[in-house]
Image (spheres, rainbow, N blue to C red):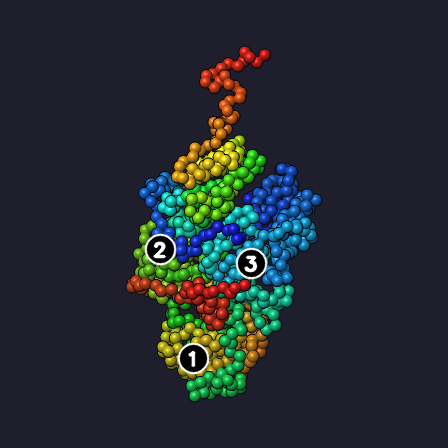
Amino acid sequence: MADAPHIPDEAEMRARWGGFAWDDQSAPQVDGIIARYPPGRQHSAIMPLLYLAQAQVGRETGTYGWLPVPVIEHVARTVDMPYIRALEVVSFYTMFNQAPVGRHLVQVCGTTPCMLRGSDDVMAACKNKGLIKGKTTPDGLFTLMEVECMGTCANAPMVQINDDNYEDLTYDSMTEILETLAAGGTPKPGPQIDRHASAPEGGPTTLKAMVSENHDYRGEWA
Amino acid sequence: MPTLTVDGIEVEVPAGATVLQACEAAGKEIPRFCYHERLSIAGNCRMCLVEIAPGPPKPQASCAMPAADKMVVTTNSEKVRKAREGVMEFLLINHPLDCPICDQGGECDLQDQSIAYGKGHSRFAENKRAVTDKYMGPIVKTIMTRCIQCTRCVRFAEEVAGMEEIGALGRGEDMQITSYLERAVTSELSGNVVDLCPVGALTAKPYAFEARPWELRKTYAIDVMDAVGTNIRLDSRGRQVLRCVPRINEDVNEEWAHDKTRHHVDGLVRRRLDRPFVRREGRLVPATWAEAFESVKAAAEAAGDKVAVIAGDLVDAETMYAAKLLARSLGSDLLEGRQTGMAYDVSSLAAVNFNTTIAGVETADAILIVGSNVRWEAALVNTRIRKAVKAGAKVYAIGEEVDLTYPVEWLGNDIGLLGRLPQALLDTFADAKQPMLIVGGAALKDGQGASLALVETLGLIKDGWNGYNVLHFSASRMAGLMLGYAQAGGIRSIAQAAPKLTFLLGADEVDFAAHALGTLVYVGHHGDKGAAAADIVLPGAAYAEKSGTWVNLEGRVQRGDRAVFPPGDAREDWAIFRALSDVLGRTLPFDTLDALRAAMARDVPMLAEPGLASIPWSAPALPISAEGGALGLPIKDFYLTNAICRASPTMQRCSAELLHGETFAEAAE
């Protein structure tokens, strides 16, 4: 467990987060989220509320956000759930962070399609920029994680950075994205090559006549 | 009622039964780890695989599959055998196989089932997973690498104990069972997870490395830590009881026991009175039995018929009966068992009995608790109430607010509320089919008349249902009341009669400073408050060292056997009285325990046969005290309620850590 993420000890967390309360941005959403579920089933709201709390912690710390224990307890109290049950949820789902993260949470997909299409290069780009798997860079900008399939296999390899996907990456384009983020810029999300979403590179290769207007191909079938 | 075939045997099972239960009904053994009769079904260990037709062509987990009509179940096919071997091989991949140093060895489900259903060898050559041990408090020791994630402990904590403090963190291979933030589990039932754990992941901390199960002598006994009368098995080696585990009795304790029952046993070998003592010049000095008896004789001759007997909380009926006969032969009927000075009316035994019965609590649909922390006074009655609440019962309570592990509507801490119950409660009780009232010891003082009046108001007594219950706390109480250990004014009446000689039967809770009781002869087993105040100490046997009869709070007569012999010169209590009667020249009419029991059965037929005594209902007309007043709770410290647990290091630590918030550093391992 030498590479386990560093979770602040409990006293430290309680001192910093013991007074956690929903802020102006989260508070109006809480009741709406709980109201999505039938009365008596408010426990079901635990996941969206934890996500909301994680985002609020992110706003308060200028990072992507994580869930300190006192915050988890606050959310559990909101839906009247025993603490251990909320902690079980947090520890089960990888999208809840149990340790502090940097401003940009870089999640590199390493599952088979991305791996075949070059996720090792993407990892190498991260490594050369000083990112270490499971760690936050000393300047607090980046936290690197390797994750399993994010469902964007047609655009492999891909990374998810905070709430955006960056797809069709190469060593160079990944380096550029990290440099842009480090400089405070906003890289263009989506495919980093000349394609729209998961459409073919360089424009359509089939049904070209239908790009701008409807076209009846039936006469050409012969 | 589905009818299905299991290995060619046709069985009919109740609707809603599982395939596993159907297989058991057919006499087929199905291996299992996660399934437990008293917990919800998890279906995660996969050990109970069977073949089911019609259905998909793969083995099914029988514990989670409802039995259906015309199902054909095969439990012994080659496919099933291979599937179980596969499951077992996977379970053992991450199990350390450290059986030689594991406390579960010899009574381990994983051991037994790997012999019966496993492959016998492993093909796993890679590194095993290891898990850090978790802290779960003073009772439960954890070796989490052994855990197979059956989640029985998690389900027990949530469903039965009602303390959601144990959970499974992480997922997949990284899943770990832990208490919340590794804090001590704050339930009085936490020890039960040790029995539930099918492997050696959760073992008893006080019993760690003490003994192997096959070297223990097992004796069936009755627990005296509270009035529930938990059926227990005492495991002893040589002259020491090493552990105490519950036996199954559906009417009393199901298969649970609270932590005090389980772990008071180390108190049985500490602070024991192992020789007689006589007070000379203000100090208790060791004496021989003959000297001690001579001192008693001298006191008895001076006292004439001014003799009293005060029974403690733990004594058996035989001791009380022997003492009663001796007192009667000396011309006295001054008997009292309610040491703390309570003085409720006992003219009708039914009116101070738990009439609904413990098992009956489960079917109640409206419950009013008056002046009782049921969780501490009768933890296993509390689990029954919890079951009733889960089935839809509504619980109201009057008294000091405590956490009873289920939702309770607290009406306030004022006994006067009995006379002016809120309309909502009256409506609930009017609609209830099986309403019940539980009157705790704290409420009997001023509220006995008012609570009896509620029998009428709340309609507690119906056809086949008696909802009036008094919750006693002392194991000796019901037998004491049957034997007449009650004076109209309680201890005060005894003191007013100015006895010159008082026998204390393990009575440690009496306020000796407040009552002049003459020469005190303490017949008991622990050097506690009673012995400290006594003038003559006659060393007796603790409950584990004698065969005795106890009557639990519902009037159930139960017999416990002797597990070990009393230490040193100590003798069984009834024999002490028999020998003393000889010295006093008033020989008691029995020479054996059987003869004593026969005489007692003639005197008090209710005590003759084990089983629920039939106590016909009658309610005394009592004045209703108009005054209100706050109710105290009789138990201040759950873990230190009697001489045995006060002498137990484990109970002292539980009290310090769980109730007084002291922290104990774990030794580095």
Q: Residue furthest left?
A: B627
Question: Left or right: where does residue B39 sit relative to residue B373?
Answer: right
Cα gap from disc 2 to disc 3, whole angstroms: 41 Å
Q: Depth check: give the residue in front, B664 or B496.
A: B664
* Mark sitting earlier along the chain (3/1): 3
Across and down, in percent, residue B429 comes to 38, 51
Q: Chain of mark 2?
A: B
Q: Is residue B380 left or right of residue B79?
A: left
x then y, percent, for residue B34: 57, 50
Which mark is on residue B143?
3
Q: Are marks 3 and 1 in contact (CB under 8 Å)?
A: no
What residue type is disc 2 on? Trp
Residue B353 appears in the rendering: no
The answer for which chain carries disc 3 is: B
Q: Secondary structure at mark 1?
A: helix
Q: What residue would you read off at disc 1?
A: B533
Q: Identify the residue shown where x is 54% and y is 38%.
A: A121
Residue to which mark 2 is pinned: B410
- B603 vs B8: above or below: below
Measured as percent of width and height from the top left, residue A188 is found at 43, 33
In the image, are marks 2 and 1 on the same chain?
A: yes
Instruction: Tell which circle, 2 or 3, labels the residue nearer the N-terminal end.
Output: 3
Q: Which mark is residue B159?
A: none
Q: Secondary structure at mark 2?
A: strand
**What's the residue type where badge 3 is placed?**
Ile
Q: Nearer the viewer, residue A195 or B9?
A: A195
Q: Badge 2: how crowded within 10 Å, few (<14), some, or many (20+)?
A: some
Q: Residue at x 34, y 48 (%)?
A: A21
Measured in 3D between alpha carbons, the distance from the residue under mark 3 to the one under mark 1, in whole angstroms, is 45 Å
> Which quadrant holds the C terminus of chain B?
bottom right
Kindly identify the residue that appears in the image at 42 percent across and 51 percent down.
A69
Q: Secondary structure at mark 3?
A: loop
